[in-house]
Amino acid sequence: MSVALVWFRRDLRLQDNPALQAALEAGHTPVPVYIHAPDEEGAWAPGGASNAWLHRSLAALDADLRARGSALVLRQGDSRAQLQALIEETGAEAVYWNRKYEPATQPRDARIKRELREQGIEATSCNGSLMFEPWDIATLQGGPYKVFTPFWRNALTRMNIPAATRLPQTLPGHAAEGVALNTLGLAPTLDWDTHFWEHWQPGETGAQEALSVFIDGALNGYRQQRDLPDRVGTSLLSPHLHFGEISPWQIVRRLEAERSASRDGDIDGYIRELGWREFSYHLLHHFPQTPEQNLNPRFANFSWAKPNATQLQAWQQGRTGVPIVDAGLRELWATGYMHNRVRMIVASFLCKHMRQHWLHGARWFWDTLVDADLANNTMGWQWVAGTGADAAPYFRIFNPVTQSQKFDPHARYITRWVPELAPLPVKARFAPWQSPSLLAELAPGYPAVPLVDLAAGREAALAAYRHTG
Ligand code: FAD
């Protein structure tokens, strides 16, 4: 039987994996390989939390392959050179992979494809992670969308759910060898991730399990509950989607099978959120400079405050004195995740009240989120900062106190992550500096005043905005 390399990257699953499926359908013995090459990701090599997840996800993929008679070959170093070495070692005639869409690796993959073909090796890339290729959805004029609603309206007219594919119970074995997972240095050495794994199960089985839990639970009422951080009101599938342990089509198929009159709204609402993920990949593809640069040129000369290391550290550590902001950043540190509503609140506080450049926040998220994703993170930060596509207008500044009163009305989320405020009456937990004597008496360790006065910070932000072109 002929041999094909199946180059796993951000598609760490076996079921419904187009590259693996194509290799099998062409009659090849697949040699599954993962090449650790963080230097090839440019300025956005995966951060600490992503690496911690990746370590476990690769272990799970290898175990799943071994259960079927195959095994994952791990390599590290230059991707092209490693593929070449494996082609020579195995006699492979073909290489299959699922596409990645980051600006640093897209040209690399195009070059590798060209060089392999010139060498007479079949090179095939597939779409394993998006519902729509970023270049397939275009405005009437043929350009990219910058506004979500028309993008999604157009996408929905093309929604054509592909049939699921089935992987055989056994896969042919191979003799290719790689390095041990531990040598890649992905797992943290200081054990800061210990508590992560009370919340997450990386790998394909964990992803399917999370989807089942969601369908049986939070899907019911998703549209109302997705904004409430005090409960599990969302799917928690983002890290699984990022690493390709599950694909959006797998999710959509399972949801479609659940349709009923009472569930329609929640299912459509959920698929629309997957649409935001599609939109972010569309934007990243068409505006590859946006991980570092404002999409909206109006902000080119915006007067961000000088980077303030003390303030940034207080924000990162959840010691700003604004409880909902501190709760979010502490949730992030403890679990590698933060609720979407709270991501917006902490990001707005950083970009508007503190007037720090959004990149400071984006980089912190990049290092600490288990779902850190260049497309989603870039769009999220630029959206909140007001510098991006279809963004909240800069002058709409979230008030973190009213946001927490509205979305965490019993201060349950605040109290879970900032437990030192528990002795205060619930009403005082949203803005404790307004009850100074209670705060001093009952929670003396908590900052007496916010890092930035909310009214003054808001005025300074608005003044800076008035001076943009
Ligand atoms: P659900 O509500 O269950 O949504 C299902 C899926 O839809 C998510 O897993 C995600 O893939 C997608 N989705 C939902 N909301 C959004 C959104 N606003 N934008 C894009 N996709 C969305 N998401 C990431 O996956 N990685 C990031 O690095 C990231 N950084 C963000 C930074 C900021 C400042 C903000 C405001 C948002 C960011 N998001 C990011 C989007 C969003 O917060 C997360 O996708 C969501 O909280 C994940 O939780 P969930 O899977 O339970 O979401």
Image (cartoon, rainbow, N blue to C red):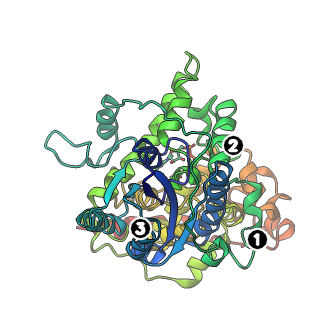
Viewer-side label of 2, 3: 3
- For the residue marked with disc 3, what is the amino acid? Ile
Using a 10 Å C-alpha cutoff, classify the residue at mark 1 as few (fewer than 14 neighbours), some (14 to 19) or many (20 or more). Answer: many
Q: Earlier in the sequence, mark 1 or mark 2?
A: 2
Q: Residue at x 81, y 71 (%)?
A: 440
Query: Residue 117: which quarter of the image?
Result: bottom left
Q: Cα distance, mark 1 to mark 2?
A: 27 Å
Q: Nearer the viewer, residue 96 or 421?
A: 96
Toward the top, the furthest residue is: 261
Q: Earlier in the sequence, mark 2 or mark 3?
A: 3
Q: Which residue is mark 3?
A: 87
Q: Residue at x 24, y 65 (%)?
A: 297
Mark 3 and mark 1 residues within 8 Å of each other at the beta carbon: no
Q: Cα distance, mark 3 to mark 1?
A: 59 Å
Q: Nearer the viewer, residue 308 or 148?
A: 148
Using a 10 Å C-alpha cutoff, classify the residue at mark 3 as few (fewer than 14 neighbours), some (14 to 19) or many (20 or more). Answer: some
Q: Cα distance, mark 2 to mark 3?
A: 46 Å
Q: Which residue is mark 1?
A: 446
Label 2's element? Answer: loop
- The response on whether ligand 1 sits within 8 Å of label 1 is no
Q: Does 194 appear above or below 204?
A: below
Viewer-side label of 3, 1: 3
Q: Which residue is mark 2?
A: 232
Q: Position of residue 468 (x, y in %)?
A: 27, 68
Q: Earlier in the sequence, mark 3 or mark 1?
A: 3
